[in-house]
Amino acid sequence: MKASCFSFSKFTLILCALAGSGASVASAEPYRPVAAVVPEQAQVVMYYPQGSVPATVYVDRELQSALLPGEFTVFCVTPGAHAIESVFNDQPLYQGKQNPTQQLPAGGETYFVQVNPGTTGNTATLEERPQAESILNGLQKHTRLVNRASQVKSCNYINTNGVILIQEQVLFRFAKSDAAGILPESRDKLDNVVKFIKQANDVSDIQLVGFTDAIGNRDANLRLSEARASTVRALLIDQGIKPEMINNTMGQGVAHSAEGCGTRASQQDTGCNVNSRRVDILVRGN
């Protein structure tokens, strides 16, 4: 069998893939947007939209799950040296467990990794949240196998004093903060958030946090992030959400996801810059 690996971002997370055969069964739980984890953890969402064989997921040489086509898994680990492999038909040699030397380093971050169909070589790719979630919304959560990876922990999410019902991101155009500056696909997401809030009967509070890319002056970016959060708040209220439900509206300036991105205006279309110009919406329940 042939194995190959890849690294991404300014961090070093390596995923390897091999080839084999298998079958497909559906599980039952649909995907819901994952919330941000505490800084002491890193979160991985691995998903397998299409294919013909199972994909075994190892964390530090131990079985985490065996994804079938149409499934996803979500897990957390502490930052540090962790090997994560997505492997096809690993028996009887279990090559996916060999030589785990790569790191998953950044606490408080969430990584979306897509397992693509294939028969040889590496098929796993890192994706940005919007692209990943457009696919994840049609997948089912893996539920058959009990996790056996000792380094995998229960995810501890920010604001754990209430149940997180939904977390969504509203993306803005470069240097824009008004309603017209929201990307069209994010307007649709905002509409869905409003529908969700109106239909839910256990919403305790809503938090809005604005961010920017790293292009431009940091003080100006802080003001821009605050303006973006205020715009989303106004839109939620205009669509019938009670103001008292929105307990926190704030801007945090440059997003962590923009660190390491280009800081010239000509680099505004870089993926990490595009996805940093946003407002995070966190809806919690009782």
Image: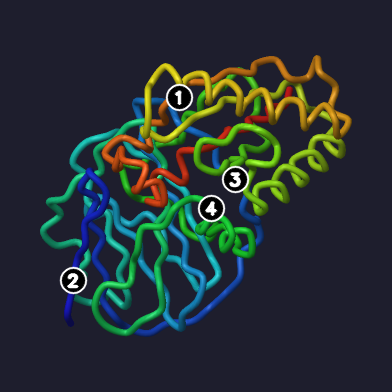
Residue 241 position, x and y percent, is 84, 28
The kind of residue tagged 2 is Ser
Of pointers 1 and 2, the one earlier in the residue sequence: 2
The kind of residue tagged 1 is Asn
The kind of residue tagged 3 is Pro
Q: Nearer the viewer, residue 81 or 212?
A: 212
Of pointers 3 and 2, the one earlier in the residue sequence: 2
- Residues at marks 4 and 3 touching, judged by CB atoms closer than 8 Å: no
Residue 185 position, x and y percent, is 65, 53
| Separation of marks 4 and 1 at Cα, in angstroms | 22 Å
> Which residue is labeled 3 in the image?
33
Tell me the quadrant of the picture where the N terminus can be found.
bottom left
Residue 201 position, x and y percent, is 85, 31
The kind of residue tagged 4 is Pro
| Separation of marks 4 and 3 at Cα, in angstroms | 10 Å
> Which residue is labeled 2 in the image?
4
- Residues at marks 1 and 3 touching, judged by CB atoms closer than 8 Å: no
Name the side, left or right, on which 26 lies relative to 92: right
